[in-house]
Image (spheres, helix red, strand yellow):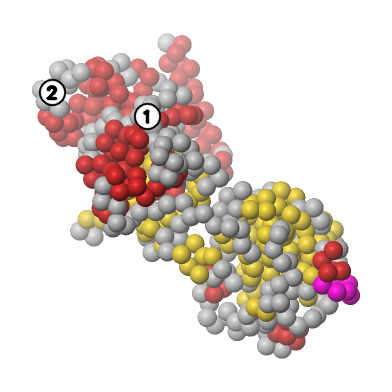
Amino acid sequence: MKKQYVFATAILLMLLSELLLPGCKKQQFREETTGDVNIVGYLDKYPDSFSLFRQILERTDNSAFLNAYGAYTCFAPTNSGVKAWLASNKFTSVEGADVNVLKELVKFHLLNDTVTTASFKDGKLPVPTMQSQFLITGVVNKDGNSSYTVNRQAAVLRSNVKVGNGIVHEIDHILTPAAKSIAQQLESDPQFSIFTQALKETKFYDRLNTVDPDTAKRWMTVIAESNQALADSGITSYAALKNRYCNTKNPENPADSLYIYVAYHVLRDIKFLGDIINSSSHQTLQPQEVISTQLIDQDVVVNEDVFDGVIEKGISLNRSKSDNAATNGVWHYAGAHYMVKYRKPAGVFWDLSAFPEIMKLPAYYKKQNYTFKRQNELDRPIKDIDWEYRLNNGDFLTYEYTTTGSIANFACNNDIITIPLNAPARPAWYEFTTPVIIKGRYKVWICYRSRNPVQVNVRVNGELMQRPVNLGEAKPAGSDAELESIGWKQYTATPAGFFSARLVGTVDIKTTERHKLRIEGLSGTNAANHLDMVHFIPVNDNQIFPRFKPDGSKVYQ
């Protein structure tokens, strides 16, 4: 009796808090009102749909905790779905099924959190199941109607049913957890026989066949190349693959190119396609080597990068054949063969005004000014440029172009960006995502038009550069050598004291990928700080040349 009173009180308090504190809710539910206080009660209310799943809960001793207060998500399969699963596994009834198998199934249908369809992205759910593996969700279109799918095994029939201890999603089939490791799944598919043999020869097979009980160490992701993908690159057998890459005669040697090839196809952690496209790069098991990733016309593309203005085409992942969940991670299907590209450090001469959002506005790009303003905290009008959100008119970034005046006469491509900094009305920082920079040691130069005395710090990947910059200070007079010795240079083709490049420091770029550069206001305030370019130049390269004409072309010594 006392337990029932405590439970009823808890439910009452929860309902009252929802009425009195609507602003505290983090998710918006498409609520369906039920008279049930828990998941089990909801299932009992519809025996024609859920009596068999209810039997499974009873037989596996899971009814008790799902009948008590908590915060769970239950994917509840209908009777027809349970019957289909029983038949496919040659069980005549729930009572005749292996109870240990049923226990794993139940855990695979439950999340220890409330997750609505607002979290159903193209990829894994934000929390694992109680069985420890992740579920993936997606959307399918059939006869003009869209519906959610779970694990490509079941369709969602009814969603976001809110009950006293969580959320119920009705599904039409049983969900079955992966039974094999990544290594075992690839080995069982003859399309990957060459890649599997490479895994074995390099001993990566053993690593990918291990299910670590510590989930913090368990997960891995593999981008696997099929025999056809390899054949398209002239590799028709494992012997041919070994002949191309095994330069030390020992595939287990971490310095061997075959070992490096395999390591470069294994990523840390579990990353479904939805996770892969959410980041521009991912660390591989090959030390200090990453793959770059992006979504191009709905294709997930690996290693398509721009180096010195030239696009290097990447390879696509086969979306329909990827997201293959395993007991220790997930693997994806590469559409073509790829390998690490070793490059020497090279200068990156980055025009800050050449970003996609302005270049896609032909009425403004290289024609007239345009201002980007954040409308709220979550708004990101420019994907690769972020800044502190300030609720006022000082919160903006302006693209400026003109055919007259100093900008036209000196700035690279006749354009600059304007960023307001400091004071209560203006952002304290702006952060830019760089072009791809090859790993190496670089000097970093900030190229700007001097205006008012606003002093800033510069950080690269969070590392504070050695010298702050006063954006109101113009370079002094002197020869190229004299200026370079004190951290200045002329970067415009035509000399102009108010267009200056300031050396802010030296940085070690540890991975070949895009990086973060942040400008932080220190003192002074102004709404018109003009930035033109940023130069990353290898420390042993010429720091003075090339210089840049107003049309963007380069002038060499």
Q: Is residue 123 above or below residue 146?
A: above
Q: Give the magenta-colored segment's residue range.
A: 472-480
Residue 206: numbered disc: 1
Of residues 220 and 238, which is closer to you in this image? 238
Point out the tag, 1 or 2, that comes first from the N-terminus. 2
Image quadrant occupied by the N terminus: top left
Helix, strand or loop at mark 2: loop
> Distance of mark 1 from mark 2, alpha carbons?
34 Å
Q: Is residue 427 visible?
A: yes
- At 77% from the left edge and 59% from the top edge, which residue is drawn? 504
Give the residue pinned by disc 2: 91
Can residue 20 be found in the magenta stretch?
Answer: no
User: Which amino acid, mark 1?
Assistant: Asp
Image quadrant occupied by the C terminus: bottom right
- At 85% from the left edge and 58% from the top edge, which residue is drawn? 523
**C-beta proximity under 8 Å, tags 1 and 2:** no
User: Residue 536 placed where, x, y %?
Assistant: 67, 62
